[in-house]
Amino acid sequence: MNNQEGYNTWAATYDTVINKTRDLEAKVLRKTLAGHKFSHILEAGCGTGKNTSWLASLATNLTAFDLSEEMMNKARQKVNDTHVTFHQADLTQNWPSLAQPADLIVSSLVLEHIEDLDFIFNEANAALGNNGLFYICELHPFKQYSGSKARFETNEGLVVLDCFTHHISDYIKAAVKHGFTLQEIDEWFDEDNEKELPRLVSFVFRKI
């Protein structure tokens, strides 16, 4: 199955199965953005809404979109805020038009499924206002080198989704090419195993 079909299937169990990557990223986001307030946040790949309600608490308006309608249905069930708008959309196609430029874009555990980072950063630049921020958190490429990929179990067996390995330098080069400067970069380890490979890498880029 393709990734859209895969995430539609995974939606039923995504929030309930043990997932260290999902849970660590939620902590990373909150640590990175704590104390900030934004006029308009664009959540590019909201999934089941694991971060959407928290992001809504930081924003006057929040626009969330995802490729998977079933994942987004889960998000809609969690989020009752009237200032949150959901759209079904593909990150690899033109992003939803916004009534006002975003001052923060959030992309969490999405870009491993996207081959062309240039397109993503080009769309992000168009969606952000001047000095807007672009937060990205992804499975660390070291984990990818060791064979880790987004995957889940079904009654028929293991489903492994299509993934692409992006080096840390790939993100930075694409960002610079499309008018961003790097503000923060961090590597994140499992709390019980900080001597092993980092699980996640996070970036905060600023549009210049």
Image: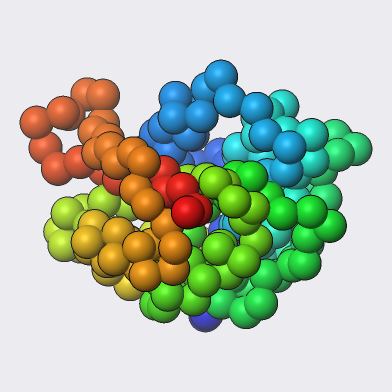
Is 165 or 202 nearer to us in this picture? 202
Q: Is residue 157 visible?
A: no
Q: Residue at x 51, y 29 (%)?
A: 33
Q: Please indicate whether residue 20 sits to the left or right of residue 50 in the image.
A: left
Q: Nearer the viewer, residue 177 or 60?
A: 177
Depth check: give the residue in front, 61 or 73: 61
> Which residue appears at 17% of the width and 54% of the height?
142
Rendered view: 150 above or below 4: above
Q: Position of residue 205 (x, y in %)?
A: 42, 48
**How many badges with numbers are in the image?**
0
In the picture, measured across the screen, residue 174 lies left or right of residue 84, that is left
In the picture shown, does residue 177 fall above or below 10?
Answer: below
Seen at 26% across and 51% down, the residue is 140
State the image quarter where residue 27 is shown: top left
Residue name at image x 59 percent, y 51 percent: 130
Furthest residue in direction top, as rendered: 35
Left or right, residue 207 beside residue 61: left
Residue 187 lies, in percent from the top left, at 25, 39
Give percent across and percent down for residue 29. 48, 34
Q: Position of residue 77 (x, y in %)?
A: 81, 42
Q: In the displayed orientation, state which residue is furthest to the left.
A: 195
Q: Can residue 58 be spotted in the picture?
A: yes
104 or 201, which is in the foreground?
104
Tell me, what colour scheme is on the image?
rainbow
